[in-house]
Image (spheres, helix red, strand yellow):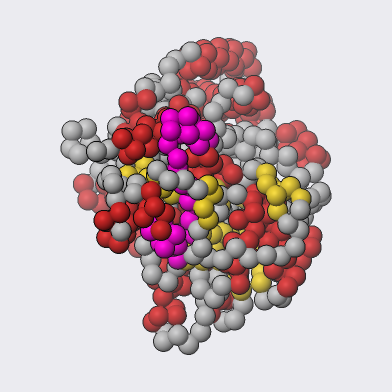
Amino acid sequence: MQLSKDKLIDAYTRMKKIRVFEETMRDEFAKGTVPAFIHLYIGQEAIASGICVELNDNDTIASTHRGHGHCLAKNSNLERMTMEIFCRADGLCEGKGGSMHIADLSVGMLGANAIVGANAPIAVGAALRQRVMGENLVSAAFIGDGASNQGAVFEAMNLASVLKLPVLFVFENNGYAEFTGVDYHCGGGDIAGRAEGFGMPSYKLDGSDFFAVQEAAAEAVERARKGEGPSAIECYAKRWYGHFEGDPQHYRTKEELETIRKDNDPLIIFRQKVEEAGLVESSELDIIDDDLTSKVFNAVEKAKNSPLPNVEELTTNVYEKGSY
Amino acid sequence: MTVKTYREAIIEAMILEMKRDEKVFVIGEDISGGRGCEDFEGEAAGGPMGLTQGLWDEFGAKRVIDTPISETAIMGAAAGAALSGLRPIAELMFSDFFGVCFDQIYNQAAKFRFMYGDQGATPLVIRTMIGAGIGCGPQHSQSPYSIFANIPGLKVVTPSNPYDAKGLLISSIRDNDPVIFCEHKALLGMDGEVPDESYEVPLGKGKILKEGNDISIVAIGQMVGVVQNCIKSLEEKGISAEIIDPRSLSPFDDEMVYDSVEKTGRLLVLDESNPVCSFGSWITSMVSEEVFSSLKAPTKVLTPPHCPVPAAPNLEAAYLPDVETIISASENLKNYS
Ligand SMILES: Cc1ncc(C[n+]2csc(CCOP(=O)(O)OP(=O)(O)O)c2C)c(N)n1
Ligand SMILES: [Mg+2]
């Protein structure tokens, strides 16, 4: 664990921000204020954060339907992202995308995506900037265990491998694709192993351990920047809540839920590690907690009080302004 | 007769046909949802919208085949199974996902009969969910039936109520060509009288929901319910509308529409697809070609504007043709001179 204190604080902040944000979204959804289905990232915070602390603004990520955590980990604008989830005029996507389509290109967040697996080739495309323009960048795709079965994902892995592109295929194995277990849907059961078949180095690790993710990410990013091509990182971390809010979760037991919340809380694991190693004081982290709670609260209040898009805006943004 | 929902009608049609013919099977994502999980307890989910609920319990894993998220493989396997003598019902959870798997539908299944010299049939049903109106956003709310109807070899069905949903699905399963069966997500909970026994609603036969003399209104899918909400206001304005639900788009009951337009002299089509090359524009084009001399006013199509389906609820509400637009369009046609 050779991370600087600043980086540890940064990492914790990203993870905690996701937790507080998603818990707040859960409450808001229950209150009926969120206009669409939402898919919460709680339980998987260490994955997005462990990858994104190794990236900078010029690096890109392509996300999924479960995208709030990726947005926050990539430092998307909190207020405008919240507004987008509430479909407001000043949201990042002007209210036209909503929870499953949040994008913040200014920080290299190429979009949440409601077509499972579609983000993998998009991340490969962003990585072409290295080959075409000689740019120093890395591009990561977050891919669920379920999404890993899409043809688009296999084609993307092969293309990235053939062209030696700077891509991280981050497989988030959270145990389920909707209501179907990974044991059932994944032939061979070894997602990272499939990536190896395409000739790329791959990792399998505990996705609730920030340090495991971050170390793998650091190695993969270094290789990618040097032009040595793509890597795959398979992270195990079960989601804590339903596929979407409102999912009664008949397909798993209460014991499973209790166990993951007790033994696999990425925030508790992180705190234990840094506090035991004497790297950060618990009180310092508590201050961050309080700060994030009020930031998220304010963002949500601001979003709820901001206007919906103007109806005249319905047909804008289909093409470049003035070109059609 | 019993009152059933659109969703229940669809499930009942599948159960009846699976009992009748052991070659009929269902394949798709999460259709038994959860049954594959080790610790499974409780009821199989039957997909996120419960459209296959109960099938697994009745027929088991042999004929209710849960798949990975691999639409190309699902549609291709269903096409191949159909070509080889089975009668698959393949579920494409949201019609928007056709983008992932369209080759298997339009280059393969749709063309087998033609390009293989009529050697075999392709009795394939693709059940898929269409439609805007419940806040699913740009990639889960589209109605691509005009794209499907554009393809020779595919049949396309758009039930607007529980009775038709059951009868059309039974006919689709018995049909020997690929049928895209478009279920509207905003209608799943709709109630209606549905007989318990098996019955067919023939493909290519429309239905006149109300007779009238001033204007023929053809409404597709969800639009049927919307236009029914206009009838009273139209009558108050002295407009007697004849309302037609074509029920299937391909084959299309053009004779029914021609006969109606010959009587009324005016045509309004309500269509939820994108306006450019919409199915509605095809209807008006056929009418202009075939019964031009009967027309007393230009034909009119109401669709959403040329934009994706927005997430914001107020924009989505403005996206779909509504009662007011329909009434004012009808008045314009009636008063045209
Ligand atoms: C191409 C496509 N097929 C199906 C779906 C419906 N769907 C949405 S999320 C999901 C499950 C995704 O599972 P996974 O990739 O493991 O991600 P997780 O939800 O676990 O984060 C499915 C089947 C979709 N959105 N896109
Ligand atoms: Mg998953």
In the displayed structure, does residue B9 sit left or right of residue A203? Answer: right
Q: Which quadrant of the figure contains the N terminus of chain A?
A: top right
In the displayed structure, does residue A257 sit left or right of residue A171? Answer: right
Tell me what residue is drawn at x 44 percent, y 15 percent: A306
Tell me what residue is drawn at x 27 percent, y 38 percent: B336
Q: Which quadrant of the figure contains the C terminus of chain A?
A: top left
- Is residue A222 something one can see in this rendering? no
Tell me what residue is drawn at x 66 percent, y 72 percent: B24
Say which of B95 and B324 sits in front: B324
User: Where B194 sits versus B84, above or below?
Assistant: above
Q: Quadrant of residue B185?
A: top right
Residue B74: within the magenta? no
Numbered range of the magenta stretch = B229-258
Q: Position of residue B67 (x, y in %)?
A: 62, 61
Say which of B335 and A307 sits in front: B335
- Is residue B192 something one can see in this rendering? yes
Q: Position of residue B221 (x, y in %)?
A: 50, 49
Say which of B324 and A200 sits in front: B324
User: Where B284 sits versus A74, above or below?
Assistant: below
